[in-house]
């Protein structure tokens, strides 16, 4: 073929088997970040209020990632998350939604399966006061 340089051609090699390619390690902090942001996508769940010397400082933080501790062993993770739940939602329903969201997002984004999620509800928050209407 005119204009084709034989040295520019690439060799076709057999693909390398997956087990021979190497290993991907996902750090605990990566799972913690993904799980913390997963809580933000659950309706009526929020990051728990901050605590200093056992005293609550401020209220729930719906715009912040929740406090999460994770332990990753090979491709399996255990997660502990502390959250606040908006009143009058069922704590059990919100906790179940948080567990499911954490499992699905961590697995889809990192490839790490979550075998256990502990949800600690440390605060119940009141709904935002209704806006006053002037008539």
Image (cartoon, rainbow, N blue to C red):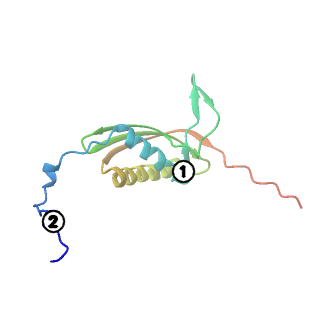
Instruction: List x then y, in percent, for residue 59.
Output: 63, 38
Kindly check if marks 1 and 2 are in contact, taking CB atoms under 8 A apart as contact. no
Quarter of the figure with residue 31: top left
Question: Helix, strand or loop at disc 2?
Answer: loop
Residue depicted at 54% across the width and 50% down the height: 90
Above or below for 51 versus 21: above
- Mark positioned earlier in the residue sequence (1 or 2): 2
Tell me where residue 2 sits by quadrant.
Answer: bottom left
Can you identify the residue that label 2 sits on? 9
Of the numbered discs in the image, which one, if any, rests on residue 106?
Answer: none
Q: Position of residue 53 (x, y in %)?
A: 57, 22
Left or right: where 87 falls relative to 38:
right
**Secondary structure of residue under mark 1:** loop
Q: Residue 14: x, y in percent? A: 10, 61
What is the residue that sits farthest to the front in this orientation? 2
Q: Residue at left 30%, top 49%?
A: 113
**Residue closest to the eye, 93 or 64:** 64
Residue at x-position 34% and y-position 50%: 110
Q: CA distance from mark 1 to mark 2?
A: 64 Å
* Extreme residue in the top direction: 53
11 lies left or right of 135:
left
Q: Residues within 10 Å of mark 1 (few under 14, many from 20)?
A: few
The mark closer to the camera, 1 or 2, is 2
Location of the N terminus by quadrant is bottom left
Q: Residue 25 at x, y = what percent? A: 27, 42
Residue 11 falls left or right of residue 98: left
Residue at the farthest bottom position? 1
Residue 90 image label: 1
- Considering every residue shown, the one lying at the far right of the view is 135
| Viewer-nearest residue: 74 or 86 | 74
**Number of labelled discs?**
2
- Does 132 appear above or below 6? above
């Amino acid at each position: 073929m005119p204009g084709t340089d034989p040295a520019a051609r690439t060799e076709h090699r057999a693909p390398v088997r997956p087990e021979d390619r190497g290993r991907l390690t996902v750090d605990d902090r990566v799972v913690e970040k993904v799980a913390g942001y997963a809580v933000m996508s659950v309706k009526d769940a929020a990051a728990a209020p901050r605590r200093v010397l056992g005293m609550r400082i401020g209220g729930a933080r719906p715009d912040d990632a929740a406090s999460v501790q994770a332990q990753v062993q090979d491709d399996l993770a255990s997660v502990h998350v502390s959250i606040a739940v908006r009143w009058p939602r069922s704590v059990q329903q919100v906790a179940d939604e948080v567990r499911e969201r954490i499992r699905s997002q961590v697995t889809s984004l990192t490839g790490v399966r979550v075998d256990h999620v502990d949800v600690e509800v440390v605060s119940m928050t009141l709904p935002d006061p209704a806006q006053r209407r002037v008539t």
